[in-house]
């Protein structure tokens, strides 16, 4: 930890000597973090999750409640502090004290790294499941409040796995030949209301590194579908999955659940035979015109492992052109119960690509992959903490429609709206956060603040 008051001198960097001194006792570089706290209060998210946690500690020896420990880790992730040992650098920061409802100048410092580590490793399997269920419930209730006057006609569920590389002796990590690394394989679930541009994270499940692509997916879908129907009983549900989920059990489940579905299918000789005529047309068009054009069609198909009769399969026949290579056939297949035209069905399926962008954003922005605890369930807690931090930043972004930050990644939101130099004053009557007057994002910051409950004065 840096000692206070250390200083450096740049004697000839500018026209005059410049001295830099770390001597501002009431300063912070996270002055904009008030928005994270306001978003949490709006959603009541950490409060709801804290209700799932049991505290086995002796009450007379507790200095940091489980709610405070939860908030400390989640707010830290939202602000870019990925590890529990970052508290050594921010434990006495006045803004971080304020976020936990402590006096920013004289209040107790944040919980230490050993306290946070004991908190994380105390979570067991049942607690992890309770947290996951409560997280989904809070998110869906939030959507119901927002769409109270206009319930969605359709909700789309997207599930997608991702890799989480590991570099230690974490429990249940395995080597994945597909990702060429030792890893976990988290499964993330999102819901989209109608055709809104923002998809909302509702599930974050850590899975062992040897889990199949669809492992646990049916259970996650079953819980989500039930909760969605409780909250939005008249809304149609659509499930969109990639080819790794296209097993017979999944398709049987989706039809038994009476939901719409669009699921990618891996190609095989029978499917290629069915799309062969249109693929020939696509190849001929490319050869004749020098550029590719997709052709869309459909067929009835049943794999040997399917109990059901033939299902509708939509396909896209296209040729891929790569520099210095021969044109290559690139047929794609989707199994569905939708009645749209083949082209529209495939367009609906392709929109799941936006979920892959959201997963990258979560991994890069709130350290989804910081699963360095030894125990599996402690790492599951870390995944949930990252998911909650992302949701708080999503709530901030949701208040920025029709601004230049409306589609900003969470890293940019953090830089523009949270990482603001500030000096904090505290009196008996109020706390004043003096933010940098030259900060270039004052209007959007104030807009979010007012939308989350602040008052202009």
Image (tube, rainbow, N blue to C red):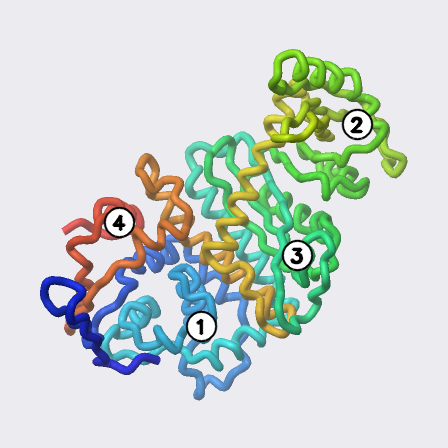
Calculate the distance from the C-alpha at mark 4 to the C-alpha at mark 1: 27 Å
Q: Which mark is residue 69?
A: 1
Whether pointer 4 and pointer 1 mark residues with C-beta atoms closer than 8 Å, the reply is: no
Residue 198 position, x and y percent, is 46, 39
Crowd class of label 3 (few under 14; some 14 to 19; many from 20; radius 10 Å): many
Q: Residue furthest right?
A: 304
Q: Is residue 87 visible?
A: yes
Quadrant where the N terminus sits is: bottom left
Q: Nearer the viewer, residue 321 or 418?
A: 321
Q: Which numbered tag is attached to residue 303?
A: none
Please say whether residue 336 is visible from this viewpoint. no
Which residue is at the far left?
Answer: 16
> Is residue 53 left or right of 440 when viewed as pictured?
right
Q: Nearer the viewer, mark 4 or mark 1?
A: 4
Q: Is residue 347 above or below residue 145?
A: above
Disc 1 residue crowd, few under 14, some 14–19, many 20+, Cα 10 Å? some
- Would you say the residues marked 3 and 2 are in contact, meaning their CB atoms lie under 8 Å apart? no
Q: What's the distance in space between the residues labelled 3 and 1, CA to CA? A: 26 Å
Residue that mark 3 sits on: 185
User: Which residue carries the number 4 mark?
Assistant: 445
Judge depth for marks 3 and 4 and give the one in front: 3
Residue 311 is labelled as 2
Q: Residue at x 23, y 76 (%)?
A: 105
Q: Quadrant of residue 39?
A: bottom left
Q: Give the residue drawn at x 31%, y 79%.
A: 2
Q: CA distance from mark 3 to mark 2?
A: 30 Å
Secondary element at image label 4: helix
User: What is the x, y in percent for residue 227?
Assistant: 60, 47
Image location of residue 393, percent across then percent down: 40, 52
Q: CA distance from mark 2 to mark 4?
A: 51 Å
Give SS at disc 1.
helix
């Amino acid at each position: 930890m840096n000692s206070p008051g250390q200083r450096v001198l740049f004697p000839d960097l500018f026209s005059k000597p410049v001295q830099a001194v770390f001597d501002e006792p009431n300063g912070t570089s996270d002055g904009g973090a008030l928005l994270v706290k306001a978003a949490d209060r709006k959603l009541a998210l950490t409060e709801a999750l804290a209700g799932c946690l049991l505290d086995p500690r002796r009450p007379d020896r507790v200095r940091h409640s489980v709610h405070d420990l939860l908030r400390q880790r989640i707010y830290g992730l939202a602000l870019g502090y990925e590890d529990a040992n970052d508290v050594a650098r921010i434990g006495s920061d006045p803004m971080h004290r304020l976020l936990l409802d402590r006096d920013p100048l004289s209040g107790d410092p944040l919980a230490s790294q050993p306290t946070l580590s004991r908190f994380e490793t105390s979570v067991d399997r049942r607690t992890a499941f309770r947290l996951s269920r409560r997280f989904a419930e809070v998110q869906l209730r939030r959507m119901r409040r927002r769409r109270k006057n206009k319930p969605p006609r359709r909700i789309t569920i997207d599930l997608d796995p991702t890799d989480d590389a590991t570099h230690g002796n974490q429990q249940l990590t395995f080597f994945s030949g597909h990702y060429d690394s030792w890893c976990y394989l988290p499964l993330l679930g999102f819901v989209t209301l109608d055709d809104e541009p923002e998809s909302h994270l509702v599930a974050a499940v850590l899975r062992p590194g040897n889990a199949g692509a669809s492992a646990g997916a049916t259970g996650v879908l079953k819980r989500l579908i039930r909760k969605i129907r409780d909250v939005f009983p008249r809304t149609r549900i659509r499930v969109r999955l990639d080819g790794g989920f296209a097993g017979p059990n999944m398709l049987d489940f989706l039809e038994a659940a009476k939901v719409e579905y669009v699921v990618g299918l891996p190609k095989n000789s029978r499917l290629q035979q069915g799309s062969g005529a249109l693929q020939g047309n696509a190849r001929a068009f490319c050869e004749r015109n020098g550029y590719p054009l997709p052709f869309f069609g459909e067929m009835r198909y049943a794999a040997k492992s399917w109990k059901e009769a033939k299902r509708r399969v939509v396909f896209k026949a296209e040729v891929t052109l790569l520099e210095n290579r021969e044109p290559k056939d690139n047929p794609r297949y989707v199994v569905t119960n939708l009645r749209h035209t083949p082209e529209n069905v495939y367009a609906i399926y392709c929109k799941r690509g936006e979920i892959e962008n959201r997963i990258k954003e979560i991994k890069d922005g709130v350290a989804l992959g910081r699963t360095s605890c030894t125990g599996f369930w402690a790492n599951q807690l870390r995944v949930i903490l990252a998911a909650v931090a992302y949701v708080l930043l999503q709530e901030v972004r949701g208040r920025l429609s029709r601004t230049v930050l409306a589609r900003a990644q969470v890293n940019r939101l953090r830089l523009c709206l949270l990482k603001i130099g500030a000096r904090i004053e505290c009196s008996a009557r109020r706390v004043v956060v003096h933010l940098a007057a030259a900060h270039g994002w004052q209007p959007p910051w104030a807009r979010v603040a007012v939308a989350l409950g602040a008052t202009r004065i």
